[in-house]
Image (spheres, rainbow, N blue to C red):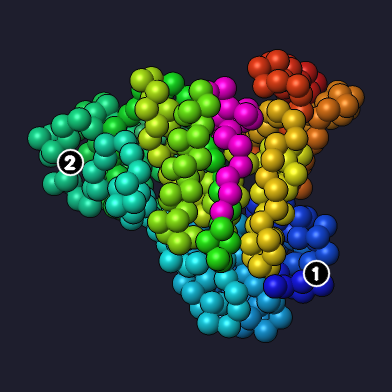
């Protein structure tokens, strides 16, 4: 067990690294952040910021010397950095698990092998993989770059083989997956935590709304049949067990119009759709990440109140700083800003969580609030 006072490191200093650092410091750990960006969101809240590349030898040696355990905040951190650190310190999650989530082709192969239902898909390595006779049942579809996509980036909706080929060429011919476009009833996600001894738990299921490929709003508990929520939680646990995963991860799922569940993707870290847990659960997903990393018993993930999480994208700053005083006049709202200097369209600047007595009215109130706070 790693106890308070010890140093924990996180690779990546974006908002997830920042929220991890805040949880760890609240629990009396000390936090080192590695991120090449001098102004990264986590730098302002960590005890120490190493401003260096993720594969920088001296930086990794310094982490190995000064920290007891290392985690990551996003899957595009080189898995090699985690593997290098694992020679000297506790690393959770395992670099091999991050490597799977970094690569959509490997991720889908793993999900299929673990028995999860996923959307029909095909790996695309070259133009010949897009011959029309190979695309039966995959169109209309979505072509997704196999690596380094997030928030819907590196994706293109395609109606036919010609459009798929054009998109593939636009992406520079890098390996992609072509995935059938699913008729979605809704989208849900499950955060799961699993410790080194294989004990695991799931968080309440979140119902997720997206706008232009970016998470917009999460409603918890999801407004779905209890049996479907149970199935999603079971699928998430099975995936974590199948990987022998150690850490916090999120499983994103599609619910089809016929109520069938498909696993979309996994994130080997806390997730935007789990941010509600900071204010609405006994143990937040970030406190849980600290617990698993430090080898402490898993914390209770029970939901205290129904909650709606609303993302604040840079677009909201179009007419100036939003009217926070209007939001904070509500007694049941929690605002989280990530300390980013410039608001660009589509950039995640913060979020707020509205706690209520039941999900549906809370959702309507949460959306009204966002309209009310848009700058003058
Ligand atoms: P994020 O980092 O936000 O999770 P991402 O870039 O990894 O996003 P995906 O999760 O694959 O991308 O897709 C983003 C969103 O696009 C999904 O949440 C969903 O709304 C939509 N989408 C993706 N694939 C499909 C599909 N096959 N059918 C229908 N909608 C899809
Ligand atoms: Mg996604």
**Residue 369 % position (x, y):** 76, 20
**Residue 130 % position (x, y):** 17, 41
The magenta stretch spans which residues? 200-224
Type of secondary structure dominating the magenta stretch: strand
**Residue 376 % position (x, y):** 80, 21
Q: Is residue 146 above or below residue 243?
A: above
Confirm if mark 1 falls within 8 A of ligand 1.
no
Q: Is residue 187 left or right of residue 222?
A: left
- Residue for point 58% across, 61% down: 195
For marks 1 and 2, give the CA distance.
Answer: 54 Å
Residue 141 lies in the magenta stretch = no
Residue 210 lies in the magenta stretch = yes
Q: Is residue 88 left or right of residue 262?
A: right
- Give whichever of 208, 12 is nearer the camera: 208
Q: Is residue 88 above or below residue 345?
A: below
**Residue 91 % position (x, y):** 57, 71
Mark 1 or mark 2, which is nearer to you?
Answer: 1
For label 2, the residue is 130
- Find ligand 1 in the image and state its quadrant: top left
Q: Is residue 161 visible?
A: yes
Q: Is residue 176 above or below residue 224?
A: below
Q: Quadrant of the N terminus?
A: bottom right
Residue 337's disc is none
At numbered mark 1, what does the secondary structure look like: helix, strand or loop? loop
How packed is label 1: few (under 14 Cα within 10 Å), some, or many (20 or more)?
some
For residue 319, which quarter of the picture? top right
- Residue for point 38% across, 35% down: 262
- Give whichever of 67, 194 is nearer the camera: 194
For label 1, the residue is 4
For residue 154, which quarter of the picture? top left
């Amino acid at each position: 067990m790693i106890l308070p006072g010890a140093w924990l490191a996180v690779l990546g200093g974006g908002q997830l690294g920042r929220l991890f650092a805040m949880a760890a410091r609240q629990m009396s750990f000390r936090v080192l952040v590695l991120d090449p960006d001098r102004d990264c969101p986590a730098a302002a809240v960590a005890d120490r910021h190493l401003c260096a590349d993720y594969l920088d030898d001296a930086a990794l040696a310094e982490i190995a010397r000064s920290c007891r355990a290392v985690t990551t905040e996003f899957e595009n951190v080189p898995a090699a950095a985690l593997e290098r650190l694992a020679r000297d310190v506790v690393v959770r999650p395992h670099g091999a698990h991050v490597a799977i989530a970094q690569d959509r082709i490997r991720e889908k192969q793993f999900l299929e092998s673990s028995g999860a239902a996923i959307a029909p898909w095909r790996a695309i390595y070259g133009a010949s993989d897009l011959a029309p006779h190979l695309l039966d049942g995959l169109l209309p579809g979505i072509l997704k770059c196999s690596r380094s996509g997030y928030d819907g980036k590196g994706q293109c909706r395609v109606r036919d083989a010609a459009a798929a080929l054009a998109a593939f060429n636009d992406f520079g011919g890098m390996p992609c997956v072509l995935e059938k476009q699913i008729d979605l009833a809704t989208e849900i996600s499950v955060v799961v935590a699993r410790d080194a001894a294989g004990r695991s738990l799931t968080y309440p299921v979140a119902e997720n709304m997206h706008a232009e490929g970016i998470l917009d709003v999460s409603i918890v508990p999801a407004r779905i049949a209890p049996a479907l929520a149970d199935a999603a939680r079971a699928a998430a646990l099975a995936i974590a067990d199948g990987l022998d995963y150690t850490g916090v991860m999120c499983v994103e799922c599609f619910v089809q119009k016929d109520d069938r569940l498909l696993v979309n993707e996994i994130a080997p870290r806390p997730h935007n759709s789990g941010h509600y847990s900071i204010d609405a659960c006994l143990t937040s997903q970030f406190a849980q990440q600290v617990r698993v990393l430090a080898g402490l018993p898993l914390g209770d993930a029970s939901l205290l109140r129904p909650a709606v999480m609303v993302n604040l994208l840079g677009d909201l700053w179009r007419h100036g700083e939003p009217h926070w005083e209007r939001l904070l006049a509500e007694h049941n709202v929690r605002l989280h800003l990530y300390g980013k200097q410039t608001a660009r369209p589509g950039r995640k600047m913060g979020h707020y969580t509205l706690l209520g007595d039941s999900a549906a009215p809370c959702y309507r109130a949460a959306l009204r609030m966002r309209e009310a706070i848009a700058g003058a």
